[in-house]
Image (tube, coloured by chain):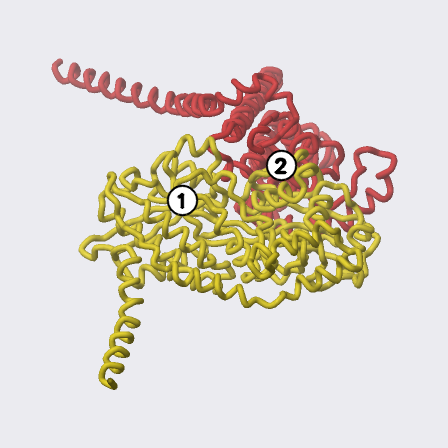
Amino acid sequence: MDKTNLNLKKRIISDKVFKIGATVAGTYVLVIVVLIAFQLLSESYPIWEEEGLSFITKTDWNAVEDRESFGALPYILGTLTTSAIAMMIGVPLSIGIAMFISDAPPKIGAPLGFMVELLAAVPSVIYGLWGLFVFRIYFRDWFETPLHNAFGDNIWLFSGNPYGLDILTASVILAIMIIPTVSAVSREIMKAVPQQQKEAAYMLGATKWEMFKLAIFPYSKTGLIGASILGLGRAVGETMAVTMLIGNATGIGAIPSSLFGPSQTMSSIIANEFVEASPASIHMPALIGVGLILLLIAIVINVIAHLLVTRMLKIKEGAINN
Amino acid sequence: MITKITSLLMIATIVAIMAPLSANAESAPDTPDSRYVYNINGAGATFPFPLIDLWRVEYNNDFDNVNLNYQSIGSGGGVKQHIEKTVNFAGSDAPLTVKERGLAPDTLHIPETVGGVTVTYNIPEIPKSGLKLTGKLVSDIFTGNITKWNDPLIKNINPGLNLPNQDIVVAHRSDGSGTTFVFTDYLTTVDPDGWGKKVGKGKSVPWPVGLAAAGNEGVAGIVRSTTYSVGYVELAYAFQTGMTFAHVQNGDKSKFIEPSIKSITAATAGLANKLPAGDADWSTVSAVNAPGPDSYPISSFSYLLVYKDLKETSKNKEEAKAMLHMIYWMITDGQTFAPTLLYSPLSDNVVELAKKSLSQVTYDGEVLWKYDSSVKPTETKTETKTTDYEIPDWIKNNAKWWADGLITDQDYIKGLQYLISQGILKV
């Protein structure tokens, strides 16, 4: 009688400890995010006071003493443009890689998968330096210049003299950088598709492509979107490599106008100017304000991704029961 | 009689030997108290970091109880830490602005080395250094007013060079930097109505044209890989990597100066008597376009910032005294190490000024070191030297150009006025 009572008490205590521990761990994440947001807001307060919400829509960027005027629009657009182009190039390629690796015999698939994961281990500054000193020059001479010569006069997308330090080069390097993340996650998701499902498709006489279309994609759609969003997350926040390749224009000149024009992303302008920004001027608050906008955009992307995934899950709930 | 003369001679020699000794004993601050170990923390500009790091090693060889820790986090970061009083001293490529000074009153500016910025180019037709450019031309190129290398304005002053009919590609820094500050300060000074009104000076400015890359290596990378480009990089970097650079017209507009350690030191020498006291407002001080015929015009001081009263940042009086001695050593003995790393040493008269600034340092109101500027006799000596000056070559050239109509009457008069101000000519 006494013993069971004691046991019960013990269980209640351990339950309480667990509850507290889990709550602390859960709130920790929330507290950190809130603290970061609060810090960014308070440190960037002078710029909101000075420029108001027009800080988001203005295109000026002048840090010269007594002429200070700051607007973040060009860098918001620069970030969104480079990320979008990187996704357009990187995601189909990554899914192709994942398809190949998941269906290839292990003797080929395993080392190839390992190689792709190795790409993810390369630090971004290495991609940046390689891009700046090697890739850019070949890319400019063999890809951008012919394209510009052929279409430059007629299509605005290819206008502007290509120097290799532009939106397209930065986006291509970004695409290379997101491929390992997206393809590694996609591969795992495709591998998780039950073998019976694939075999069932084959049994119905499906070709390889039809098998992917019928059996794998419907099953792994949500996962693939999740993987792409992971890649987008990396592309939006990537700093070093982009800074080295995007041409780092400021002000109105940084608004993307052509694939071969320079621009600037939110993270790259912070990296470029933070170190030497005068603590006594609103230059510093302006850069921190850009950081705040970057955080908000990252949150919005994640929320959209979350909504997409949950909606997809609801649709698929009826179709797949496993 | 003979004994008298010899004794007089002996006294004279003793005095002669004593004089420098006593001058030394008087002028240098006390060496760090060897009973304690000191950790001096500094932070700031990246430009002087290699030199400060060498000083750290060399000073530590002599005084192994003093450890210097200098973090090259950039001038902006250095100024921030100086304002927050978290470091013993800060390094900055630009003097404190009026606003910054408001946050850190009673800051002393101690010039510790001199930097120069070269205008570097990549023109296959001109594989060597020596393209001549005036300040206005450099400004017009970086503003985008001059877009071709064979522009008549460039051709006129470079008669012997094969300037191609090609578009100029401008390269500049994307990151905030002291190099940009010096360069834009120069452009603002030589072209106040064009560059000054349109862009202005700063560590990062709204560039009207051009491609941008981070760091000296980034700009150098663009210039090297893009034909017909022009950019600006720090002197030491241009030297080490063997880049081609322009000779820029001096502030007197009398000749075109090759950037070198010597011509940059000359620039600061020409400026010394215009500098304010160490504890005054330095925000308008600039070493660009310095007077003197051999002064390279795109030069600038790099500063150490310390509080006038070291109690603000030092743990105790001993630490304050150790740091005072270390900074004194940097601006005197330390200068000999500068050329080995391609830095320009301070000119003697700037060192004098820096010493005077250091003598203002106190700890809790107590003066730590009295500087007796007993070096004045040598100063008058150099002054007397100038009286038997010969007419320098540049003024002969100047006269020839004036006769040929290459320079205006005003420029020629300026040259003559310089001679008068130096006491070479008398009216």
Residue A281 placed where, x, y %?
Answer: 50, 29
Which residue type carries mark 1? Gly
**Foreground pick, B196 / B77:** B196
- What's the colour of chain B in the image? yellow
Could you tell me which residue is drawn at 48 percent across and 51 percent down? B272
Left or right of B136, for residue B50:
left
Which residue carries the number 2 mark?
A: B200
Residue A196 visible within the image: no
Q: Which residue is mark 1?
A: B278
| Rendered colour, chain A | red
Q: Quadrant of residue A199?
A: top right
Q: Residue at x 54, y 48 (%)?
A: B287
Image position, residue B38 (x, y; %): 26, 51
Seen from the viewer's position, the closer of residues B52 and B13 is B13
Front in this rendered view, residue A81 or B199: B199
Which circle, 2 or 1, is nearer the viewer?
1
**Which class describes the residues within 10 Å of circle 1: few (<14), some (14-19), or many (20+)?**
many
Instruction: Judge from the rendering whether residue A319 lies leftward or rightward of residue B150; answer left or right.
Output: left
In three-dimensional space, the C-alpha distance between marks 2 and 1, rounded to whole angstroms, equals 26 Å
* Label 1 secondary element: loop
First in residue order: circle 2 vs circle 1: 2
> As drawn, is B367 to the left or to the right of B141?
left
